[in-house]
Amino acid sequence: MEYNKLVRDKIPEIIMNQQEVPVTCVLNDEEFNCELKKKLVEEVNEYLESEEVEELTDIMEVLYALAKTKGYSETELENLRIKKCNERGKFDEKIFLIKKK
């Protein structure tokens, strides 16, 4: 079976533990960035279909990897998120903007 997609680091090991042989390659930075974007779309779509919390953790992992490609650590990304929350708020109040006059 062909997959042709970015997978988590331990997937080849898991495949070998199932008595199968993974065929892999290591991507260069440009390819990795491109595949991370595809993976983000894949994971978001999986969440939208299933609404399972576990899918949100997959989205977070992809987001952390994308941030790392931009030179940001998980902590720095979280600090930026908090800064933006302090400046613009969260989504706690469920506000839906219809228009501005």
Image (spheres, helix red, strand yellow):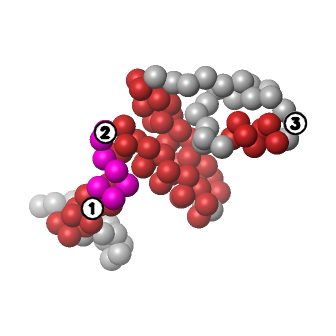
* Magenta stretch bounds: 70-76
Label at residue 19:
3
Residue drawn at 44 percent across, 44 percent down: 65
Query: What is the secondary structure assignment of the residue under circle 1?
Result: helix
Q: How crowded is mark 1: few (under 14 residues within 10 Å), some or many (20 or more)?
A: few
Query: Which sits earlier in the primary sequence, circle 1 or circle 2?
Result: 2
- Residue at point 17%, 66% (across, down): 87
Which residue is painted at 55% across and 52% down in the image?
A: 58
Residue at the spot of label 2: 70
From the viewer's perspective, tell me whether residue 23 is left or right of residue 93: right
Q: Where is residue 69 in the image (x, y as percent from the top left)?
A: 36, 37
Disc nearest the viewer among 3 and 1 = 3
Report the side of 84 relative to 95 (left or right).
left
Q: How far apart are marks 2 and 3 (CA)?
A: 37 Å
Taking 83 as reference, is 72 above or below it? above
Helix or strand or loop: what does disc 2 sit on?
loop
Q: Can you identify the residue that label 1 sits on?
A: 79
